[in-house]
Amino acid sequence: MEDIALGRSATLPQPQAEEEICIEIRDAVKIYDRNNVVFRGLNMTVPKGKIYGLLGPSGCGKTTLLSCIVGRSELDSGHIMVKAFKREDIGYMPQDLNLHEHLTIAQTYKFYGGMLNMDKEQIAKRTKELSLLLELPSDNRLVETLSGGQQRRVSLGVALLHNPNILILDEPTVGLDPVLSHSIWNHLVSFAERGKTIIITTHYIEEARQAHTIGMMRGGILLAEDSPETLMARCNTATLEEAFLTLSYKQETSSNTQVDDSFKKLAAKKCSIKLKLNDGVFRFNRMNCLLYKNVSLLLQQKMFLLFLFLLPLVQTYFFNLAIGHDPKGLYIAVVNKEMQQRQPGECKPEYYKGCFLDNPDDVLMSCAYVDQMKTKSMNILHYDDVDTALKAVRKNDAWGLLYFPTNYTTSMAVRFVNASRTSDLDVELSTVQAWIDLSDQYIGNMVKANVIFGMQEYLGVALAKCNVSTKIGNTPISFREPVYGSVNTTFIHYASAAILCLCCYYLPVLLTAGLILTEKKEGMMERMMVSGIKFSEVLVSTVIMQMIIHAIQTAISMYVMYIYFDNPYIGDHFPTVLILILLGMEGMIFGFFIGAICKDFIFATYLGTGSNIMMSFTCGLIWPLEGAHYLLKLTGPLFPLTAPVKALLAVTAKGWSFDSEPVYLGFLSIFGWSSIMILGIFITSRINKDLWILRK
Ligand SMILES: Nc1ncnc2c1ncn2[C@@H]1O[C@H](COP(=O)(O)OP(=O)(O)OP(=O)(O)O)[C@@H](O)[C@H]1O
């Protein structure tokens, strides 16, 4: 016991001569940070076919040690040797539940059994055996509906499922009643008798009496490692608990424990772990199991499934209802001095039925203009004078003011009959003065356009009555049939491509990031990784399942956008669908990336939403990139959604195909970004081995 004073178990535990070693740890050092040194040169020897009870106070590092043994965490230095040759040799039950709560017991066993190469019959047989052994309820029950104790027994069942040679159990009896704990210990004893090696941690020190060897851990080392009887005899105590207290007391009071830096020398050494299981980088059976798990989880959550398909429908439907339609029923103030003088009251068609060039005194052109404005869904508010009307505009009662001078029609006639001899006064009196509220750029410009086109239209009608070419009143330019698009093109026609791309990109981002992060946060990812799952298999299985969902979502969005709301679509189906499907795949990979690098949902939400807003700015939905700052104009096309949006617009609105530059650049952008993100995930997972683990 004097060795304890050195702060590390100086005498390496020696197994009996005939005992074969199954797990051996030497000079283990694990340092999270300067104030958090978990192992200070820890040594541990677990004989084959024995139960090893690892005891120690909360936070002493038992879980960390087990996760180093199963290969989920790495030592900073030291050696770990585990006599396991294939993944199926190890059964691991983590401290937390780390199970998918939306799966049934049977589905859980099917998933983990399949991953460990068990066939259907074997899994069904073991499910029945474990149900009896662990006194589990019907295997159709969802894990989330089980009590805490039942859930832990299912978790233990996962570790026992494939009948492994080495069992690593982190507090399997927590939350179980004494009868069940006793029965589980009995089973562990019988497993050991059949040659299986078991490491078990427990807070209930006395129940560990049934273990063959006890390792008492404290202060980053094993205080002692021996059989329960020997330990009690050496400490001269009647219980293991007392033995532990005695050893702890000795460690506390030992004069040499004040400063122990000896482990630092060890920390400089290399770390080696002899747990090289040949799992391969990608196996189809594991990928199929993940697919089975993903589909089962989805089918169990019917409301979520419904939501997945309603979301694109509602998004595109509301977009079409809300965006791109001209505002109607806007108010415009009118001060019509001509009417006030000649015909007070409301305008009537008979006031302007004649030709204003022949009889300007019998025609009220100002009335014709005001009525023309009404056809543009504008409401007219009449005022007596400009000051009152302007006050109304300033109060937001109207979006603008039109002022007609007293001799408007007469001066207009002079202007048209003899343009070269028209006086400045006639020019001024034949001019309608307009004040527009431009605080809202879109509405202001629309009112302005209505005022200009209203003038052209009413003049055209008035000139026709005088048998003069209607075009005389127009600006001398003629717009012919549009090359692409239609004369009635609205904002929605242009924006529909961007909205479809955003939906097809971001719905998979949200779903994938959410799924990965949930599995990571709840510890399922870590447990799956211990069972041999590789990130490439998680990636492929997630992408396959989400592709099916995404294909349905895309079909719904396209139906609403192009069939129900009849937005322009003259291109081929194949490039259109391909852009949207591949964009969804890029979104999934981005979601996977977010799930991998984020530690919590808040950060993931910021990353997802923040990037969504930025993509909306740069993809041309809000404003064409051609009008952006030159630096953004230069770099904007490199953003993930800019080129695909241009490609989709080129296909749907212009009918272009793969051989046109915007279309193939769109595809190149999708492939480029997908590859960059896959590489990013791969490199990050190489650098950070704990990428899939979240400590609570
Ligand atoms: N990822 C981590 N980063 C920093 N510190 C960690 C991390 N994981 C564990 N620790 C710290 O390492 C120490 C050992 O933790 P561990 O969970 O292994 O203890 P334990 O003996 O299993 O505790 P318990 O019996 O309460 O489960 C604790 O102080 C813990 O705070």
Image (cartoon, grey):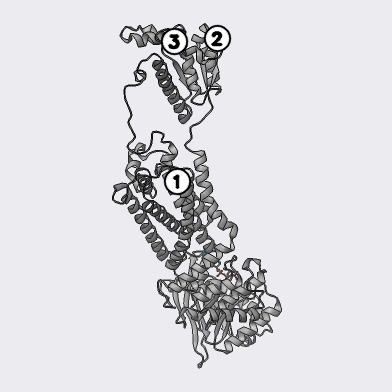
Q: Is residue 387 visible?
A: yes
Identify residue type, mark 3: Tyr
Q: Position of residue 486 (x, y in %)?
A: 38, 36
Identify residue type, mark 1: Tyr
Check mark 3 vs ligand 1: CB closer than 8 Å? yes or no.
no
Q: Residues within 10 Å of mark 3 (few under 14, many from 20)?
A: many
Name the residue beneath numbered marker 3. Answer: 408
Q: Are marks 2 and 1 in contact (CB under 8 Å)?
A: no
* Mark closest to the chain's N terminus, 2 or 1: 2
Identify residue type, mark 2: Pro
Q: Is residue 195 left or right of residue 484?
A: right
Name the residue beneath numbered marker 1. Answer: 562
Element class at badge 3 = helix
**Residue drawn at 54 percent across, 47 percent down:** 314
**Residue drawn at 45 percent across, 18 percent down:** 434
Element class at badge 1 = helix
**Residue drawn at 47 percent across, 21 percent down:** 372
Q: Is residue 211 left or right of residue 69?
A: right
